[in-house]
Image (spheres, rainbow, N blue to C red):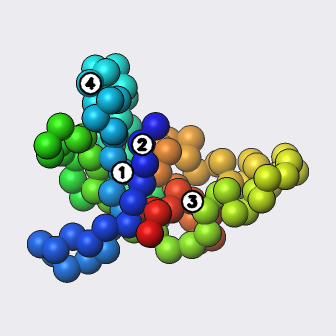
Amino acid sequence: MGAVWKALDTKHGRHIALKLLPPELTADPERRQRLLREARAAAAVTHPNIAAIHEIDEAEGVTFISMELVDGRTLRSVIGGRPMPIPEVLRIASVPAQSSFIRKTNVGPRAKS
């Protein structure tokens, strides 16, 4: 729903993942509320497989979520445009049942550099 970018949090001196909801989607109250619900749900969970949420805010008409940046491969690079065996899909998908923020050692949403 939103684009995720690698960013520098200059206040805290750390790299973060910044999920942005584009202005055209921010104007849609349903999309904006969906992003905020997603962020609040993830922020309420403390789990080693879910990225920590640092901030949920809006600036210059852009709604964003600031979260922990997790190193690793993207799900797209793991899938490689090919079908995956069901056991592998279940292994990867088991954790995000609570949230779309995956923090796996090797797989999860990653920021664009």
Give the mark, 4 or 2, whose residue is nearer the N terminus: 2
The image shows residue 28 at horizontal and vertical percentages of 31, 21
Rendered view: 6 above or below 42:
below
Give the mark, 2 or 3, whose residue is nearer the N terminus: 2
In this view, the residue in front, 71 or 41, is 71
Give the mark, 2 or 1, whose residue is nearer the N terminus: 2
Question: Where is residue 32, by image quadrant?
Answer: top left
Give the mark, 1 or 3, whose residue is nearer the N terminus: 1
- Residue 27's label in the rendered image is 4
Q: Amino acid at mark 1?
A: Lys
- Residue 19's label in the rendered image is 1
In this view, the residue in front, 75 or 88, is 75
Q: Around disc 1, counting alpha carbons within 10 Å, would you say few (fewer than 14), some (14 to 19), or many (20 or more)?
A: many
The image shows residue 18 at horizontal and vertical percentages of 33, 57
Please say if the residues under marks 1 and 4 sit with CB atoms less than 8 Å apart.
no
Q: CA distance from mark 1 to mark 4?
A: 16 Å
Residue drawn at the location 85% of the way across and 48% of the way down: 83
Q: Amino acid at mark 2?
A: Gly
Q: Is residue 13 left or right of residue 18?
A: left
- The residue at which mark 3 appears reads as 108
- Residue 2's label in the rendered image is 2
Give the mark, 1 or 4, whose residue is nearer the N terminus: 1
Query: Callout 4: helix, strand or loop?
Result: loop
Marks 1, 3: nearer the viewer: 1
Q: Amino acid at mark 4?
A: Ala
